[in-house]
Amino acid sequence: MDSVRSTRGVCASCVYNVPSWTLRPAVPDPALLNLLVNLTSPAHTLPVSYNLALYCNAISSPKGMESAMSLAPILLCPHCCSTLLAQKPHQPKNSLANFQYYGHKRLGEATSKGFNGASPFELALILCTGTSMVTFHYNPQSSWAGYTPEETHQ
């Protein structure tokens, strides 16, 4: 097996672990980075693992950046690349900025230990709880139907 085709990388936008040969570098210009901003996230939860101000407050994964402390190309999976670099660019559905960034680096020590020590069953229970709420908000039959995620959190 070709070693280049077997290595994996991370998309800066959605944090999907994909074959590295499918990742495309994108120049982090302000128009692209503004699509990865979530203005409703509290300041105390924003990432600290890269230079957030340099990246125009875009919420992304430093694992998908060529450099976390200087402005450099970011790596995007095919889906995020086609969405962000389209003729009418928009935020990818699975991007961290779309209420999928959890601020793990900002958790308190006790909470971090709790998550790190949790069994797969306990993590699944937590996931199911979050999934129920997300499913409720996006369910077309619910009272929130037709609202964007930003509108439901106001």
Image (cartoon, grey):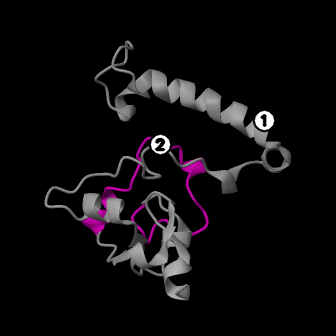
At mark 1, the secondary structure is helix
* Number of numbered callouts drawn: 2
Q: Which residue is painted at 38% across and 56% down in the image?
A: 36
The image quadrant of residue 13 is: bottom left
Answer few, some or many: residues within 10 Å of disc 1's Cα (few below 14, many 20 plus, some between 14 and 19): few
Q: Is 130 situated above or below 20?
A: above
Q: Which residue is painted at 59% across and 49% down in the image?
A: 45
Answer few, some or many: residues within 10 Å of disc 2's Cα (few below 14, many 20 plus, some between 14 and 19): some
Q: Which residue is painted at 78% across and 35% down in the image?
A: 122
The image quadrant of residue 6 is: bottom right
Q: Main secondary structure of the magenta part?
A: loop
Looking at the image, which residue sits at the far left? 87
Across and down, in percent, residue 130 comes to 59, 31
Could you tell me the amino acid type at mark 2?
Phe
Horizontal placement of 124 versus 147: left or right? right
Could you tell me the amino acid type at mark 1?
Glu
The image quadrant of residue 153 is: top left
Q: Which residue is painted at 35% across and 28% down in the image?
A: 151
Across and down, in percent, residue 107 comes to 72, 49
Which residue corresponds to mark 2?
99
- Distance in Å between CA atoms under marks 2 and 1: 22 Å
Q: Which mark is residue 122?
A: 1
Horizontal placement of 11 versus 110: left or right? left
Q: Does the magenta run of residues contain 139? A: no
At mark 2, the secondary structure is loop
Which part of the image, by quadrant, shows the C terminus? top left
Across and down, in percent, residue 134 comes to 49, 29
Q: Nearer the viewer, residue 123 or 34?
A: 123
Which part of the image, by quadrant, shows the N terminus? bottom right
Disc 2 and disc 1 in contact, CB within 8 angstroms: no
Q: Which residues are magenta?
A: 30-57
